[in-house]
């Protein structure tokens, strides 16, 4: 059994200190096996914002796997944006753009989808799609395989349509071949659960999407701050959204899935 806390869009620089403290408290108490951070750790990629994000993550005392988001690349400092887009991210958060965590029950790969040449949108490179295959292809089928990116593969069920990650279908085809079970994504500041087949009809096997809202930032888009707690207990898997209600994060009803014959089925 494994647990993953999926947090996203922290936006230090625009984070609410009370919510930051509550999230730290929750995560220390639930002590997940891994904290997966799906990007936008900062608001404007400033040094002090990265330092706050680093202090928050290090203060948890838990294993962390993070990927950058579009906000983690400087916006107005054009020279830095073009020449050293992820320099501060590498210095403060992770030296690697595409981190990998594996134990005897799960494998988690993060891919950086933020690009210096696009402002909000993101994409996968062909070499990153090759990394998906390299990392996941030879792992035992019983291991849960999870991919973390900032930009989404699936549109939000409600709300304005936003661009999905570029080369998303190519990435999903690699995920399908390699038996990836779950995608953890952010960027939309909206939380929802889905199956990529609802949008990508070329994909024939269930790949679940757990989209996290913004955990602690004041950049809300019509819904409360939230994070996801994911429980991997083969053949079962569940995702519980913890939503902020002004006094603390409260768990909502979990979304449960059962794996039968290699297919994830949603349980009511
Ligand atoms: Fe964001
Ligand atoms: Fe973003």
Image (tube, grey):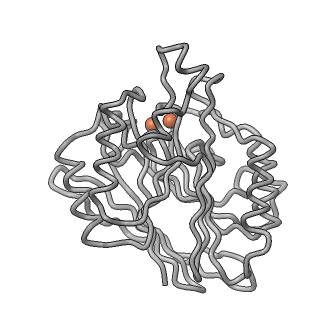
Residue beneath the point at 52% across and 78% down: 232
Q: Whole-percent x and y of residue 213?
A: 42, 48
Q: Is 143 on the left or on the right of 23, as rendered?
A: right
Work out whether residue 117 or residue 46 is closer to the camera in this orientation and state it: 46
Residue 69 in the image: above or below residue 138: above
Residue beneath the point at 29% across and 41% down: 52
Q: Whole-percent x and y of residue 220?
A: 35, 36
Image quadrant in which you'd find residue 250? bottom left
Work out whether residue 228 or residue 39 is closer to the camera in this orientation and state it: 39
Q: Quadrant of ligand 1?
A: top left
Residue beneath the point at 43% across and 48% down: 8
Q: Is 239 on the left or on the right of 201, as rendered?
A: left
Image quadrant in which you'd find residue 78? top right
Q: Whole-percent x and y of residue 37?
A: 46, 53
Q: Whole-percent x and y of residue 258?
A: 60, 81
Work out whether residue 34 or residue 241 is closer to the camera in this orientation and state it: 34
Q: Is 34 on the left or on the right of 223, as rendered?
A: right
Residue 247 in the image: above or below residue 52: below
Residue 34 in the image: above or below residue 200: below
Image quadrant in which you'd find residue 216? top left
Residue 4 in the image: above or below residue 115: below
């Amino acid at each position: 059994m494994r647990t993953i806390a999926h947090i996203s869009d922290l936006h230090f620089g625009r984070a609410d200190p009370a919510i930051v403290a509550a999230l730290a408290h929750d995560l220390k108490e639930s002590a997940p096996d891994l904290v997966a951070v799906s990007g936008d750790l900062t608001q404007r990629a400033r040094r002090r914002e990265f330092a706050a994000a680093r202090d928050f993550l290090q203060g948890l005392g838990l294993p962390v796997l993070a990927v950058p988001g579009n906000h983690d690349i400087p916006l107005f400092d054009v020279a830095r944006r073009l020449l050293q887009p992820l320099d501060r991210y590498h210095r403060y958060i992770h030296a690697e753009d595409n981190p990998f965590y594996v134990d005897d029950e799960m494998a988690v790969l993060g891919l950086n989808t933020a690009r210096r040449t696009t402002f909000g949108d993101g994409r996968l490179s062909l070499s990153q799609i090759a990394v998906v295959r390299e990392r996941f292809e030879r792992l035992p089928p019983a291991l849960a395989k999870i991919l973390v990116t900032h930009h989404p593969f699936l549109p939000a069920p409600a709300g304005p349509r936003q661009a999905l990650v570029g080369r998303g279908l190519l990435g999903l085809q690699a995920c399908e071949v390699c038996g990836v079970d779950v995608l953890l994504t952010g960027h939309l500041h909206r939380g929802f659960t889905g199956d990529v087949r609802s949008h990508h009809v070329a994909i024939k096997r269930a790949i679940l999407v757990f989209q996290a809202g913004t955990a602690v930032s004041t950049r809300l888009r019509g819904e409360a701050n939230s994070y996801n707690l994911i429980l991997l207990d083969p053949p079962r898997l569940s995702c519980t959204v913890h939503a902020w209600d002004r006094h603390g994060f409260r768990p909502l009803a979990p979304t449960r899935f059962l794996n039968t014959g290699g297919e994830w089925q949603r349980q009511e």
